[in-house]
Image (spheres, coloured by chain):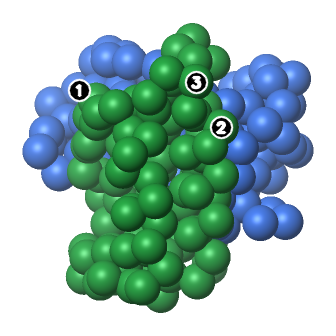
Chain colours: A blue, B green
Amino acid sequence: MFGLIGKMRAQAGKRDALLAILLGSTGNMPGCLSYVVAKDPADPDAIWITEVWDDRESHKASLQLPEVQAAIKQAMPLIAGFDSSTEIEPVGGFGLPGS
Amino acid sequence: MFGLIGKMRAQAGKRDALLAILLGSTGNMPGCLSYVVAKDPADPDAIWITEVWDDRESHKASLQLPEVQAAIKQAMPLIAGFDSSTEIEPVGGFGLPGS
């Protein structure tokens, strides 16, 4: 499996609007096993996204999906920056299909 | 919802053994919505755990479960350190019950 842990920063006061866009585009992404969108309680502008995919190719292909492309276009003006993006290799756990 | 993103470090050469313990204790934890155990592909000793709970209290209570206590006892000798633990507030996404 392939995974990512990412932290981004919304423009001041725009986190809720950005969260709505991110949540609106997570529905139907082939190969996506988990996609969690979260606030950082210690930072009013920060958003964390933790993702698990069946493999790297599924994640890469998702970025070309029309609804994801549309969400990225909508979201970019509200994003102040990307703080970190860590690649992980999920090996199992609870809450993943088949676990 | 309540969540955590944690990075720990296994003793050199002990990551697989530590992963097995972590994976063995994720089964039946009331209030746990997602618990993903992952390798860090860039660091042979590092493990990432991303968790989502229905609330903080469920997470706290899980630490008292007999099987979790037993896993912690088994795991501690294999853990070299805890690099980071970030609290997050999941707001939704894909792959969570009810999403």
Q: Is residue B41 above or below residue A68?
A: above
Residue visible at 57% across and 33% down in the picture: B15
- Chain letter of the residue carrying label 3: B
Residue type highlighted by circle 1? Gln
Of B14 and B60, the residue lying toward us: B14
Instruction: Tell me the SS state at disc 2.
Output: helix
| Numbered label attached to residue B16 | 2
Q: From the viewer's perspective, is B49 left or right of A70?
A: left
Would residue A62 be seen by someone viewing this image from the given angle? Answer: no
Residue carrying label 3:
B13
Q: From the viewer's perspective, is A98 left or right of B62?
A: right
Of B38 and B9, the residue lying toward us: B9
Furthest toward the top, the residue is B42
Of B80 and B55, the residue lying toward us: B80
Mark 1 and mark 3: span between their CA atoms? 43 Å
Q: Is residue A6 above or below residue B99?
A: above
